[in-house]
Image: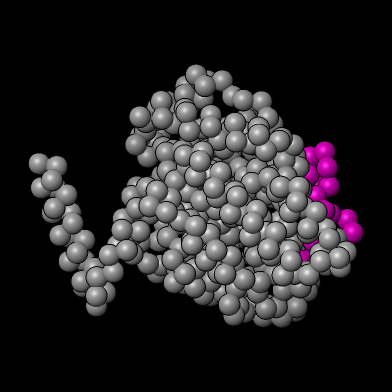
Amino acid sequence: MAERCFFVFFKWMEKRYTETHQKIDWKRMEEDIMAKQHAPFRYDYVGSFLRPEKLKEARKALEEGKITAAELKAVEDEAIRDLVKKQKEAGYHVITDGEFRRSTWHLDFMWGFEGVAHKKTEQGIAFQGEDAMLDDTWLTGKIRVGTHPFVEHFRFVKDLEDEHTVAKQTIPAPAQFFAQMLIPGNLEQTRKVYKTDEELMEDIAEGYRKVIRDLYDAGCRNLQLDDCTWGLLVAEGFAGSREEIQESAEKFVKVNNLAIQNQPEDLVITTHVCRGNYHSAYFSSGAYDPIAKPLFGEEQVDAFYLEYDDERSGSFAPLAEVTGEKKVVLGLITTKSPVLEEKEEVKKRIYEATKYIPLDRLYLSPQCGFASCEIGNKLTEEEQWAKLALVKEIAEEVWG
Ligand SMILES: [Zn+2]
Protein backbone atom coordinates (compact mmCIF):
# COMPACT_ATOMS: atom_id res chain seq x y z
CA MET A 1 0.00 0.00 0.00
CA ALA A 2 2.79 2.37 0.95
CA GLU A 3 4.59 1.58 -2.28
CA ARG A 4 1.41 2.16 -4.24
CA CYS A 5 0.88 5.58 -2.58
CA PHE A 6 4.44 6.51 -3.29
CA PHE A 7 4.11 5.39 -6.89
CA VAL A 8 0.97 7.52 -7.43
CA PHE A 9 2.60 10.51 -5.78
CA PHE A 10 5.69 10.03 -7.87
CA LYS A 11 3.69 9.83 -11.07
CA TRP A 12 1.79 12.96 -10.15
CA MET A 13 5.03 14.85 -9.49
CA GLU A 14 6.47 13.60 -12.76
CA LYS A 15 3.38 14.82 -14.64
CA ARG A 16 3.48 18.18 -12.91
CA TYR A 17 7.12 18.62 -13.75
CA THR A 18 6.71 17.55 -17.36
CA GLU A 19 3.99 20.15 -17.71
CA THR A 20 5.94 22.98 -16.16
CA HIS A 21 9.46 22.13 -17.26
CA GLN A 22 10.43 20.94 -20.70
CA LYS A 23 12.74 18.31 -19.31
CA ILE A 24 12.51 16.60 -15.96
CA ASP A 25 15.19 17.88 -13.64
CA TRP A 26 15.41 15.02 -11.14
CA LYS A 27 17.78 16.78 -8.78
CA ARG A 28 15.59 19.87 -8.60
CA MET A 29 12.49 17.72 -8.12
CA GLU A 30 14.09 16.00 -5.17
CA GLU A 31 15.11 19.34 -3.65
CA ASP A 32 11.62 20.77 -4.09
CA ILE A 33 9.97 17.80 -2.42
CA MET A 34 12.29 18.07 0.54
CA ALA A 35 11.84 21.83 1.00
CA LYS A 36 8.09 21.79 0.62
CA GLN A 37 7.51 18.82 2.85
CA HIS A 38 9.75 19.78 5.68
CA ALA A 39 10.35 23.52 6.07
CA PRO A 40 9.86 24.56 8.76
CA PHE A 41 11.30 21.56 10.56
CA ARG A 42 10.02 20.12 13.84
CA TYR A 43 13.20 21.38 15.46
CA ASP A 44 14.35 24.50 13.76
CA TYR A 45 16.11 27.79 14.46
CA VAL A 46 15.76 31.41 13.42
CA GLY A 47 19.10 31.82 11.65
CA SER A 48 21.86 33.94 13.21
CA PHE A 49 24.72 32.43 15.23
CA LEU A 50 27.42 33.82 17.54
CA ARG A 51 30.35 35.12 15.52
CA PRO A 52 33.63 33.30 16.22
CA GLU A 53 36.40 35.47 17.70
CA LYS A 54 38.53 35.14 14.57
CA LEU A 55 35.72 36.60 12.46
CA LYS A 56 35.16 39.52 14.84
CA GLU A 57 38.88 40.30 14.74
CA ALA A 58 38.94 40.16 10.94
CA ARG A 59 35.98 42.56 10.62
CA LYS A 60 37.72 44.96 12.97
CA ALA A 61 40.98 44.64 11.01
CA LEU A 62 39.14 45.49 7.78
CA GLU A 63 37.66 48.57 9.41
CA GLU A 64 41.13 49.66 10.49
CA GLY A 65 42.47 49.10 6.99
CA LYS A 66 44.77 46.29 8.10
CA ILE A 67 43.33 43.62 5.78
CA THR A 68 41.56 43.66 2.40
CA ALA A 69 37.92 42.76 1.67
CA ALA A 70 39.16 39.59 -0.03
CA GLU A 71 41.04 38.58 3.12
CA LEU A 72 37.92 39.15 5.21
CA LYS A 73 35.89 37.04 2.78
CA ALA A 74 38.34 34.16 3.20
CA VAL A 75 37.85 34.30 6.98
CA GLU A 76 34.04 34.46 6.54
CA ASP A 77 34.07 31.50 4.14
CA GLU A 78 36.03 29.38 6.58
CA ALA A 79 33.82 30.38 9.53
CA ILE A 80 30.63 29.59 7.57
CA ARG A 81 31.93 26.20 6.44
CA ASP A 82 32.73 25.40 10.04
CA LEU A 83 29.31 26.62 11.24
CA VAL A 84 27.41 24.56 8.67
CA LYS A 85 29.43 21.51 9.65
CA LYS A 86 28.33 22.06 13.26
CA GLN A 87 24.69 22.63 12.25
CA LYS A 88 24.76 19.29 10.46
CA GLU A 89 26.50 17.54 13.35
CA ALA A 90 23.81 18.91 15.68
CA GLY A 91 21.34 16.99 13.49
CA TYR A 92 19.47 19.99 12.09
CA HIS A 93 17.93 19.91 8.63
CA VAL A 94 18.32 23.59 7.92
CA ILE A 95 21.62 25.29 7.25
CA THR A 96 22.38 29.04 7.25
CA ASP A 97 25.48 31.17 7.07
CA GLY A 98 24.69 32.39 10.59
CA GLU A 99 24.50 35.91 9.08
CA PHE A 100 28.30 35.93 9.42
CA ARG A 101 28.75 38.31 6.49
CA ARG A 102 26.53 40.97 8.07
CA SER A 103 26.90 43.42 10.89
CA THR A 104 23.14 43.53 11.54
CA TRP A 105 20.19 41.30 10.69
CA HIS A 106 18.41 44.01 8.70
CA LEU A 107 20.42 47.08 7.68
CA ASP A 108 23.09 45.32 5.60
CA PHE A 109 20.31 44.04 3.36
CA MET A 110 19.01 47.58 2.79
CA TRP A 111 22.52 48.78 1.92
CA GLY A 112 22.44 46.38 -1.05
CA PHE A 113 19.85 48.62 -2.76
CA GLU A 114 20.46 51.75 -4.81
CA GLY A 115 19.04 54.88 -3.20
CA VAL A 116 20.02 53.82 0.33
CA ALA A 117 22.88 55.43 2.27
CA HIS A 118 24.34 54.70 5.71
CA LYS A 119 26.94 55.94 8.16
CA LYS A 120 28.12 55.15 11.67
CA THR A 121 25.59 56.29 14.22
CA GLU A 122 26.34 58.83 16.89
CA GLN A 123 23.36 58.14 19.12
CA GLY A 124 22.25 54.57 18.48
CA ILE A 125 18.80 53.20 19.31
CA ALA A 126 17.64 52.80 22.90
CA PHE A 127 17.07 49.13 23.81
CA GLN A 128 16.20 48.01 27.34
CA GLY A 129 19.39 48.60 29.29
CA GLU A 130 21.68 49.39 26.36
CA ASP A 131 21.90 51.59 23.25
CA ALA A 132 22.18 49.56 20.05
CA MET A 133 24.88 51.18 17.91
CA LEU A 134 23.33 50.47 14.53
CA ASP A 135 24.30 52.51 11.47
CA ASP A 136 21.98 55.39 10.51
CA THR A 137 20.34 54.26 7.27
CA TRP A 138 18.27 56.55 5.04
CA LEU A 139 17.11 57.23 1.47
CA THR A 140 19.01 59.35 -1.03
CA GLY A 141 16.98 58.40 -4.11
CA LYS A 142 14.49 55.93 -5.59
CA ILE A 143 14.88 52.38 -4.36
CA ARG A 144 16.31 50.14 -7.09
CA VAL A 145 18.28 46.92 -7.04
CA GLY A 146 20.70 45.27 -9.43
CA THR A 147 22.32 42.05 -8.30
CA HIS A 148 21.96 42.03 -4.55
CA PRO A 149 25.09 40.81 -2.70
CA PHE A 150 22.95 38.40 -0.61
CA VAL A 151 22.33 36.28 -3.73
CA GLU A 152 26.03 35.43 -3.91
CA HIS A 153 26.05 34.86 -0.15
CA PHE A 154 23.18 32.41 -0.55
CA ARG A 155 24.96 30.49 -3.33
CA PHE A 156 27.81 29.78 -0.94
CA VAL A 157 25.45 28.13 1.58
CA LYS A 158 23.49 26.36 -1.15
CA ASP A 159 26.71 24.62 -2.22
CA LEU A 160 27.02 23.19 1.29
CA GLU A 161 23.57 21.52 1.19
CA ASP A 162 23.42 17.73 1.25
CA GLU A 163 20.57 15.22 0.99
CA HIS A 164 19.56 15.89 4.60
CA THR A 165 19.64 19.68 4.63
CA VAL A 166 18.02 22.72 3.06
CA ALA A 167 19.70 26.13 2.97
CA LYS A 168 17.65 28.92 4.49
CA GLN A 169 18.05 32.58 3.55
CA THR A 170 16.95 35.20 6.05
CA ILE A 171 16.23 38.79 5.02
CA PRO A 172 14.44 41.61 6.83
CA ALA A 173 10.74 41.84 6.01
CA PRO A 174 9.65 44.47 3.48
CA ALA A 175 7.72 46.15 6.33
CA GLN A 176 11.02 46.58 8.15
CA PHE A 177 12.51 48.40 5.17
CA PHE A 178 9.36 50.53 4.92
CA ALA A 179 9.37 51.38 8.66
CA GLN A 180 13.09 52.22 8.59
CA MET A 181 12.45 54.98 6.04
CA LEU A 182 9.60 56.42 8.11
CA ILE A 183 11.33 56.70 11.49
CA PRO A 184 11.28 60.31 12.76
CA GLY A 185 14.88 61.08 11.75
CA ASN A 186 14.29 59.80 8.19
CA LEU A 187 10.76 60.92 7.36
CA GLU A 188 11.59 64.35 6.00
CA GLN A 189 14.28 63.00 3.68
CA THR A 190 12.07 60.10 2.54
CA ARG A 191 9.30 62.52 1.61
CA LYS A 192 11.68 64.30 -0.76
CA VAL A 193 11.95 61.02 -2.70
CA TYR A 194 8.49 59.51 -2.19
CA LYS A 195 5.48 61.77 -1.74
CA THR A 196 3.26 58.97 -0.44
CA ASP A 197 3.60 55.74 1.53
CA GLU A 198 2.01 53.90 -1.40
CA GLU A 199 4.78 54.91 -3.82
CA LEU A 200 7.40 53.89 -1.29
CA MET A 201 5.69 50.53 -0.75
CA GLU A 202 5.52 49.86 -4.50
CA ASP A 203 9.25 50.37 -5.01
CA ILE A 204 10.22 48.35 -1.95
CA ALA A 205 7.98 45.49 -3.08
CA GLU A 206 9.36 45.60 -6.62
CA GLY A 207 12.92 45.50 -5.32
CA TYR A 208 12.11 42.54 -3.07
CA ARG A 209 10.43 40.64 -5.90
CA LYS A 210 13.62 41.00 -7.95
CA VAL A 211 15.84 39.80 -5.08
CA ILE A 212 13.49 36.90 -4.27
CA ARG A 213 13.44 35.85 -7.93
CA ASP A 214 17.26 35.94 -8.05
CA LEU A 215 17.48 33.94 -4.82
CA TYR A 216 15.03 31.40 -6.22
CA ASP A 217 17.08 31.08 -9.41
CA ALA A 218 20.12 30.49 -7.22
CA GLY A 219 18.26 27.52 -5.69
CA CYS A 220 16.62 29.09 -2.65
CA ARG A 221 13.49 27.22 -1.51
CA ASN A 222 13.42 28.35 2.12
CA LEU A 223 13.15 32.09 2.69
CA GLN A 224 12.47 33.83 6.00
CA LEU A 225 11.38 37.43 6.44
CA ASP A 226 12.50 38.83 9.79
CA ASP A 227 10.10 41.42 11.09
CA CYS A 228 10.43 43.68 14.14
CA THR A 229 7.69 46.07 13.05
CA TRP A 230 4.98 44.06 14.80
CA GLY A 231 6.91 44.13 18.04
CA LEU A 232 6.93 47.88 17.76
CA LEU A 233 3.17 48.10 17.26
CA VAL A 234 2.38 45.96 20.29
CA ALA A 235 5.00 47.64 22.47
CA GLU A 236 3.82 48.64 25.90
CA GLY A 237 3.92 52.42 25.97
CA PHE A 238 3.63 52.68 22.16
CA ALA A 239 2.19 56.14 21.64
CA GLY A 240 -0.24 55.25 18.83
CA SER A 241 -4.01 55.02 19.26
CA ARG A 242 -5.93 51.85 18.39
CA GLU A 243 -6.75 53.29 14.97
CA GLU A 244 -3.13 54.22 14.31
CA ILE A 245 -2.03 50.70 15.21
CA GLN A 246 -4.58 49.24 12.80
CA GLU A 247 -3.56 51.66 10.06
CA SER A 248 0.14 50.79 10.42
CA ALA A 249 -0.68 47.08 10.64
CA GLU A 250 -2.56 47.25 7.36
CA LYS A 251 0.39 48.94 5.67
CA PHE A 252 2.87 46.39 7.02
CA VAL A 253 0.76 43.49 5.78
CA LYS A 254 0.24 45.21 2.46
CA VAL A 255 3.91 45.80 1.71
CA ASN A 256 4.85 42.29 2.88
CA ASN A 257 2.18 40.67 0.73
CA LEU A 258 3.01 42.84 -2.29
CA ALA A 259 6.62 41.71 -2.12
CA ILE A 260 5.83 37.99 -1.90
CA GLN A 261 2.91 37.83 -4.30
CA ASN A 262 3.11 35.50 -7.32
CA GLN A 263 6.08 33.60 -5.99
CA PRO A 264 6.81 30.06 -7.22
CA GLU A 265 4.72 27.48 -5.41
CA ASP A 266 7.71 25.47 -4.28
CA LEU A 267 9.31 28.40 -2.47
CA VAL A 268 8.56 28.22 1.25
CA ILE A 269 8.26 31.73 2.67
CA THR A 270 8.12 32.16 6.43
CA THR A 271 8.38 35.11 8.78
CA HIS A 272 9.99 35.62 12.17
CA VAL A 273 8.16 38.15 14.33
CA CYS A 274 10.48 39.80 16.78
CA ARG A 275 10.71 42.24 19.66
CA GLY A 276 14.34 43.11 19.03
CA ASN A 277 17.50 41.26 20.02
CA TYR A 278 20.75 43.08 20.74
CA HIS A 279 23.41 41.82 23.15
CA SER A 280 20.67 39.93 25.09
CA ALA A 281 18.65 43.17 25.40
CA TYR A 282 15.22 43.56 23.83
CA PHE A 283 13.51 46.50 22.19
CA SER A 284 9.84 46.04 23.03
CA SER A 285 7.35 43.99 25.06
CA GLY A 286 3.73 43.24 24.28
CA ALA A 287 1.32 40.43 23.44
CA TYR A 288 0.23 39.55 19.88
CA ASP A 289 -3.44 40.34 20.53
CA PRO A 290 -3.78 43.80 18.87
CA ILE A 291 -2.13 42.68 15.62
CA ALA A 292 -3.22 39.04 15.47
CA LYS A 293 -5.92 39.49 12.84
CA PRO A 294 -3.87 41.28 10.16
CA LEU A 295 -0.64 39.42 10.89
CA PHE A 296 -1.84 35.85 11.40
CA GLY A 297 -4.94 36.19 9.28
CA GLU A 298 -3.85 38.17 6.24
CA GLU A 299 -0.11 37.78 5.78
CA GLN A 300 0.44 35.26 3.01
CA VAL A 301 3.35 33.31 4.47
CA ASP A 302 3.66 29.56 5.02
CA ALA A 303 4.75 29.80 8.66
CA PHE A 304 5.37 32.14 11.60
CA TYR A 305 8.43 31.87 13.87
CA LEU A 306 7.09 33.46 17.06
CA GLU A 307 8.76 34.62 20.23
CA TYR A 308 7.25 32.87 23.24
CA ASP A 309 10.21 32.71 25.59
CA ASP A 310 8.75 34.82 28.39
CA GLU A 311 5.73 36.78 29.55
CA ARG A 312 6.62 39.66 27.19
CA SER A 313 4.88 37.77 24.37
CA GLY A 314 1.59 37.17 26.19
CA SER A 315 -0.65 34.12 25.77
CA PHE A 316 -1.26 31.66 22.93
CA ALA A 317 -4.86 32.89 22.47
CA PRO A 318 -4.02 35.16 19.46
CA LEU A 319 -2.98 31.99 17.58
CA ALA A 320 -6.71 31.42 17.06
CA GLU A 321 -6.41 34.04 14.29
CA VAL A 322 -3.93 31.98 12.22
CA THR A 323 -5.75 31.17 8.99
CA GLY A 324 -5.52 28.34 6.45
CA GLU A 325 -2.76 25.79 6.70
CA LYS A 326 -0.17 28.24 8.04
CA LYS A 327 2.28 26.72 10.51
CA VAL A 328 3.52 28.11 13.81
CA VAL A 329 7.06 27.65 15.10
CA LEU A 330 6.95 28.20 18.85
CA GLY A 331 10.01 30.07 20.10
CA LEU A 332 9.92 28.64 23.61
CA ILE A 333 13.66 28.38 24.21
CA THR A 334 15.40 31.69 24.87
CA THR A 335 18.65 32.80 23.24
CA LYS A 336 18.93 35.73 25.64
CA SER A 337 20.24 33.65 28.53
CA PRO A 338 22.37 30.49 28.80
CA VAL A 339 20.05 28.90 31.38
CA LEU A 340 18.51 25.74 29.96
CA GLU A 341 14.73 25.52 30.12
CA GLU A 342 12.90 22.78 32.02
CA LYS A 343 12.01 20.15 29.43
CA GLU A 344 8.67 19.24 30.95
CA GLU A 345 7.71 22.90 31.25
CA VAL A 346 8.38 23.46 27.53
CA LYS A 347 6.37 20.37 26.59
CA LYS A 348 3.49 21.58 28.73
CA ARG A 349 3.49 24.87 26.86
CA ILE A 350 3.53 23.14 23.45
CA TYR A 351 0.42 21.22 24.48
CA GLU A 352 -1.17 24.44 25.73
CA ALA A 353 -0.71 25.90 22.24
CA THR A 354 -2.58 22.93 20.71
CA LYS A 355 -5.74 24.53 22.07
CA TYR A 356 -5.42 26.93 19.11
CA ILE A 357 -3.25 25.13 16.50
CA PRO A 358 -3.14 21.35 16.00
CA LEU A 359 0.10 19.69 17.06
CA ASP A 360 0.67 18.72 13.47
CA ARG A 361 1.11 22.39 12.50
CA LEU A 362 3.29 23.30 15.47
CA TYR A 363 7.11 23.35 15.50
CA LEU A 364 9.81 24.27 18.02
CA SER A 365 12.77 26.68 17.92
CA PRO A 366 14.60 29.27 19.96
CA GLN A 367 12.64 32.56 20.10
CA CYS A 368 15.20 34.48 18.06
CA GLY A 369 18.67 34.23 16.58
CA PHE A 370 21.78 33.99 18.76
CA ALA A 371 23.37 37.08 17.26
CA SER A 372 21.00 39.37 15.40
CA CYS A 373 23.86 41.84 15.36
CA GLU A 374 27.51 40.92 15.27
CA ILE A 375 27.93 41.73 18.96
CA GLY A 376 25.84 38.61 19.75
CA ASN A 377 23.91 37.61 22.86
CA LYS A 378 25.43 36.97 26.27
CA LEU A 379 26.07 33.27 26.09
CA THR A 380 28.99 31.16 24.91
CA GLU A 381 29.15 29.09 21.73
CA GLU A 382 29.00 25.96 23.85
CA GLU A 383 25.83 27.25 25.54
CA GLN A 384 24.37 28.11 22.12
CA TRP A 385 24.75 24.50 20.94
CA ALA A 386 23.35 23.22 24.26
CA LYS A 387 20.22 25.28 23.60
CA LEU A 388 19.85 23.74 20.14
CA ALA A 389 20.43 20.24 21.52
CA LEU A 390 17.60 20.89 23.96
CA VAL A 391 15.24 22.08 21.19
CA LYS A 392 15.94 18.90 19.21
CA GLU A 393 15.54 16.62 22.21
CA ILE A 394 12.18 18.12 23.17
CA ALA A 395 10.89 18.09 19.58
CA GLU A 396 11.79 14.43 19.17
CA GLU A 397 10.01 13.55 22.39
CA VAL A 398 6.88 15.48 21.37
CA TRP A 399 6.61 14.61 17.67
CA GLY A 400 8.65 11.38 17.59
ZN1 LIG B 1 14.13 37.86 16.68
Residue closer to the observer: 279 or 192: 279
Depicted 217 relative to depicted 291: above or below: below
Span colored in magenta: 122-138
Q: Determine the residue positioned at 47% across, 21% down.
A: 348
Depicted 70 relative to depicted 33: above or below: below
Residue closer to the observer: 170 or 352: 170
Residue closer to the observer: 279 or 82: 82
Residue 38: horizontal and vertical position, in percent?
A: 37, 47
Q: Determine the residue positioned at 81% across, 66% down.
A: 67
Q: Can residue 63 be seen in this view?
A: no
Q: Is residue 399 magenta?
A: no
Q: Is residue 85 left or right of residue 311?
A: left
**Quarter of the rendering occupied by the N terminus:** top left
Residue 300: horizontal and vertical position, in percent?
A: 43, 57
Depicted 352 relative to depicted 252: above or below: above
Q: Determine the residue positioned at 55% across, 53% down.
A: 96
